[in-house]
Image (tube, rainbow, N blue to C red):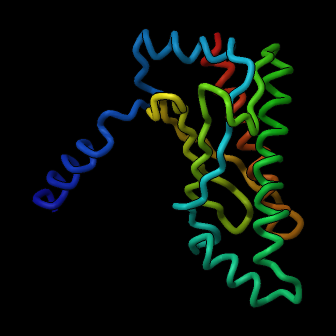
Amino acid sequence: MIKFFLPLSLALFTLFGSVNCSYAQTKEEREFLKSLQNEKEINVILDMSRASIHGYSESDFVYREDLQSDKDWATLWETEYKPDLLNKFLGSFNLMLFDFGYTVKFGDFKNSKYQLRIQVIKVLSGGSTAVELSIEDREQLELIYLFKIDGLGGKYGSKVNLMGDGFTRAGRVAARKFHKFFK
């Protein structure tokens, strides 16, 4: 077991060693994160390329739902359901940041200098959501900071409704995290 673990650990450290995590901030990282509150707009991208949704890849999840539905679920996913998940995240995130007193706005701002990538890792059957948030410099194409958050799903409603609850709560968790960054 140790023979396997050590080479794997070294490979993972080599691969991810340069990515910053929320628990290991240098003074420069803290200053940068604090300075983000002075930005007017920050672009946001929802990335589900590595997502496990109810135990399936995004495409397999959508295909299964499409087979069980009398509607064109695949089209609904791309045009309505998935954009709504991002809107739920951003709505709760931006509102909570505003309530904390910040004016920076996160959304669809293609000309902004910085970008927040929401990399969905897992969505459980109750809608609970695990995501990695990365702050990227769009001009230099560089990852600046990476951290993970979770959003608790709901109890009642359709699969998409429960996922929406998870994304809404993840947005609130992210806002609290940014509030800590901005202090």
153 lies above or below 70 = above
Residue at (78, 15) in percent of width and height? 102
- Could you say where residue 57 lies in the image, as x and y percent from the top left? 57, 72
The residue lying toward the viewer, choosing from 59 and 21, is 59
- Could you say where residue 25 lies in the image, as x and y percent from the top left? 43, 19
**Which of the 4 image quarters holds residue 34?**
top right
Residue at (15, 53) in percent of width and height? 7
| 141 left or right of 38 in image | left
**Total marks placed:** 0
97 lies above or below 82 = above
98 lies above or below 174 = above
| 25 left or right of 151 in image | left
In the picture, which quadrant includes the N terminus? bottom left
| 178 left or right of 1 in image | right
In the picture, which quadrant includes the C terminus? top right
- Could you say where residue 158 lies in the image, as x and y percent from the top left? 86, 70
**Which of the 4 image quarters holds residue 3?**
bottom left
